[in-house]
Image: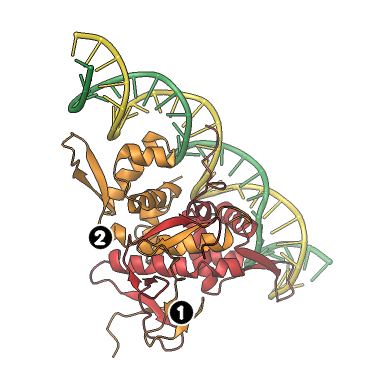
Chain colours: A red, B orange, C green, D yellow
Amino acid sequence: MVKRTSHQSADCLIARPLDAIGDWWSLLIVRDAFDGMRRFGEFQKSLGVAKNILSARLRNLVAHGILETVPAPDGSAHHEYVLTEKGRGLFYVLVALRQWGETYFSGPGEPYTFMVDRESGRPIRRLEVHAEDGRLLAPGETRLADFRLQPE
Amino acid sequence: MVKRTSHQSADCLIARPLDAIGDWWSLLIVRDAFDGMRRFGEFQKSLGVAKNILSARLRNLVAHGILETVPAPDGSAHHEYVLTEKGRGLFYVLVALRQWGETYFSGPGEPYTFMVDRESGRPIRRLEVHAEDGRLLAPGETRLADFRLQPE
DNA sequence: TCCATTCGGTTTCAACTTGAAACCATTGCG
DNA sequence: CGCAATGGTTTCAAGTTGAAACCGAATGGA
């Protein structure tokens, strides 16, 4: 075996992100970070993940610029992990995954949790994909195109 | 070791979806399926993945109702893999991941590929998260809430 | 002061997963 | 009939994961 396959250098811009966050734990760490968690111990408790794994994942997320470490504000020797701009960019991925989960993975009769506007407490709208001119695009109504030279 | 950790029964509706698609290959298979691929060989060639792994992933995606097998239209004994409704629901996840990739993972001077409207060939708009009343929500301006009883 | 505890990890090691390559069963075709 | 293509499964070494033990630096209390 050469090595677990990496998509670091794949052409596809879906494959490359998966290299950074493409495992079970990383996205959950990011989710918790959006929920305000910052400390190693908080993540560990929330996720129930083994410490070595958490350690490796945090290191990887920091290496990819998704989290960054900042000195702990309480003056302790430890540091905290906070989302970078790039990390906050994962918000839309989380929302998409979440809405998919709400639609297809919530058991009947199960306490239904969903994403609400923090301000009003009301559910948010479903994500939509729009063309440049505003038309709503259904799944599959897109394709990929090269723009080596900016057209027009 | 008990078993590789599963989030099947996690409360969180972000964790549970990750159980279905939370590895490198599954989402790439779904991406290819959106691109019209249907045959084992097509996926294998496109992804360069070992056949045993592809086989296991396809089985898993079918088991989760993301793909389904249909008899091959050419009358051969083989079948094809096509996206179900649930599978097509992953469109928004792919778009979100893709836009994140476009923003943060495209090397400078690299041939820039992005998602365009199939009809017009023009780039699509960025995803936005909106509150019920239409207000634009920034990353972090949401939270999760329980709706055991429908409020209002 | 000294012992205990918490926090944030690293190390160790067995079980599990991954991937390359070999193998196998059907069908298609000349 | 023979041979290649398709769509897998099997095998096995190497890599990854996870539970638990360990460790070192700071507090925290008695």
Residue B12 in view (yes/no)? no
Residue B48 in view (yes/no)? yes
Question: Vertical placement of A92 versus A60: above or below?
Answer: below
Read off the chain for label 1: B
Q: Residue at x 49, y 63 (%)?
A: B99
Q: Marks 2 and 1: same chain?
A: yes
How far apart are labels 2 and 1 at the CA level? 27 Å
Foreground of the two, A27 or A50: A27
Between disc 2 and disc 1, whose residue precedes? Answer: 2
- Count of numbered circles in the view: 2
Task: For mark 2, give the secondary structure.
Answer: helix
Q: Name the residue under label 2.
A: B85
Q: Residue furthest front?
A: A152
| Numbered mark located on residue B142 in the image | 1
Provide residue B136's location: percent of width, then percent of height: 46, 82
**Picture quadrant of residue B8:** bottom left
Foreground disc of the pair 2, 1: 2
Question: Vertical placement of A51 versus B103: above or below?
Answer: above
Circle 1 Cα neighbour tier, 10 Å, few/some/many (<14 / 14–19 / ≥20): many
Q: In this view, does A97 lie to the left or right of A3?
A: left
Provide residue A62's location: percent of width, then percent of height: 63, 59
Looking at numbered disc 1 in the image, what kind of residue is underneath it?
A: Thr
